[in-house]
Amino acid sequence: MNNKIYISVIVISFNGMEFIEDCLASVQKSLDEVVDSEILVIDNGSTDGIVELIENRYPNIQLIKNRDNLGFARAVNQGFEKARGEYVLILNQDTRIQDNAIVKLADRIRTDSRVGTIGPKFIGFDGQLQKSCRAFPKYRDLVFAFLGLSKLFSESNCFSSWKMGWFDHLNEREVDQPMGAALMVRKDILDKIGGFDERFRIFFNDVDFCRRAKEAGYVNLYYPSAVIEHYYGGTIRKMKPQMVLEWHRALAEYFIKYSPGGPSKIIALFWKIFLILLSYPRALYHKVISS
């Protein structure tokens, strides 16, 4: 018997009670007319009542309950293991689907076998466009960021190439990396490149995944015809100092992973030490301003 279906949606939840109902309601509405679809929630040890809410109000949603917070990457991989869809949408809990955005993403990715991942246009809950596409980071991007040049020249193709400040996000485009807050994946590419690398618990797992997809010959596509609302940072805002530390650690790990050896590896180790040292005063700063 073939249990494969068309679309699986994986929602990763962690103490996001203020977001989860809107998120799940919008997903269900977007999939109303898609018979062969499923919704999975992977909960990372929430203590705010999310699990009980889902069990009571959403009996048709598959719920995986982790006792502890295993990290975003591990939760996504748990979802991949359970998902039966040809196309799998990874979704943050602080999102709301507009109209039939999920179906639009799936219909677009199925028309081109080169496309391995596809991401929507993001707008904030305030209706403002979020520039969500990224290039793969390079060492020069760190230099420009720390010198303040990437902010000073935010639309420059040179100084802001990493965050693609020059791209208006109005048209479909092949990119290095669409934002992982809502990323649809062609399920069969997992057999070739594997799932998320769990070394990147929270940050840069989407960057790493898209890089492996591109290196395997797939295209990562930005598709603005599908629109998803995103409360930027909503999932991690409450733990900002810890997240600053984790962001720097993950970026350092990313450069280590993609440094082939020799002088390149030495440079990567230097940046790892620098980033880790830098993360502590930045985390302290965020702790002070948030208190």
Image: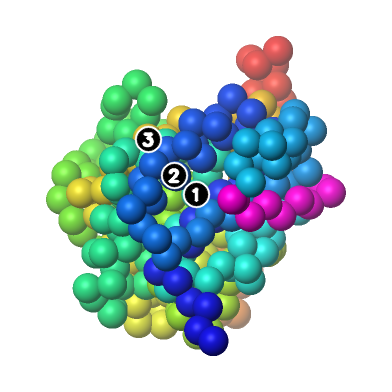
Secondary structure under badge 1?
strand
**Along the horizontal axis of the image, is 92 left or right of 116?**
right
Q: Which residue is label 3 attached to? A: 229
Q: Mark 3: give few (<14), some (14-19) or many (20+) Cα within 10 Å.
A: many
Contact between marks 2 and 1 (CB within 8 A): the answer is: yes
| Residue at the right extreme of this rendering | 67
Q: Earlier in the sequence, mark 3 or mark 1?
A: 1
Amino acid bearing label 2? Val
Q: Which stretch is magenta? A: 60-69
Q: Can residue 200 be seen in this view?
A: no
**Residue 32 appears in view:** yes
Q: Is mark 2 on a helix, strand or loop?
A: helix
101 sits to left or right of 51: left
**Closer to the N terminus: mark 2 or mark 3?**
2
- Name the spot of residue 14 as percent of width and height, x first: 68, 39
Residue 269, image x, y percentages: 66, 63
**Residue holding disc 1:** 91
